[in-house]
Amino acid sequence: MNCVSSSYGVSAAKGVLRLTLRAEHQDEYDSLINCIKNKALQGAAEQGLECSISFIEPFPATVNAGASVQKLKVAADSLGVKNAFLQEPMRWSEDFGYYLQKTRGAFFGMGCGEQHAGLHTATYEFNDAIIEAAVDLFIKLVE
């Protein structure tokens, strides 16, 4: 039986708090996690409550290797593929943080232009026109 419901204004016997946490750097993320854990455990202890903490899909920071970024830029430039460095981190690079813990590399995206719906939006539709440029870029990187 599920004892947790979305009820308000009642004295709860159980409760669940779910958060999505993101940070630009791994040390900031780790610090944020530790701060929240400590406050939750301390607050529960002060109130005589039980507190358990679990994690679902934590992702490490995606940190590109400088040499790999340079190789990517040289390859893109040689193919005439317009490229730019983002001023803000991509918020949809989660899995790639694991890859870059195992090997030096660079995470990048192939854009479809500013007039195209963004990735992970309800109106996004993959643009087949970018496939050839992406394949050419990967071939150039392998060469």
Image: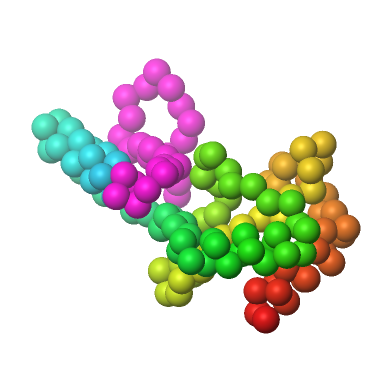
Residue 22 visible (yes or no):
yes
Q: Which residues are magenta?
A: 1-29
Prevailing secondary structure class for the magenta stretch in the rendered image: loop
Residue 57 visible (yes or no):
no
Residue 43's image quarter? top left
Q: Position of residue 38 (x, y in %)?
A: 19, 41
Please say whether residue 93 is one of the residues in the magenta stretch. Answer: no
Task: Judge left or right: residue 47 versus residue 77.
Answer: left
Q: Position of residue 57 (x, y in %)?
A: 46, 57
Work out whether 63 lies above or below 8.
below
Task: Pick out the residue farthest to the bottom.
Answer: 143
Residue 61's image quarter? bottom left
- Residue nearer the viewer, 117 or 89: 89
Q: Position of residue 40 (x, y in %)?
A: 23, 38
Question: Residue, x 41% and y 69% (percent of image)?
Answer: 101
Residue 108's image quarter? bottom right
Work out whether 79 lies above or below 50.
below
Question: Residue, x 66% and y 55% (percent of image)?
Answer: 109
Task: Pick out the residue farthest to the right.
Answer: 129
Task: Judge left or right: residue 125 versus residue 18.
Answer: right
Q: How many marks?
A: 0
Indicate the colouring scheme: rainbow
Q: Position of residue 91 (x, y in %)?
A: 54, 45
Question: Residue, x 38% and y 38% (percent of image)?
Answer: 17
Please say whether residue 9 is one of the residues in the magenta stretch. Answer: yes
Image quadrant in which the C terminus is located: bottom right
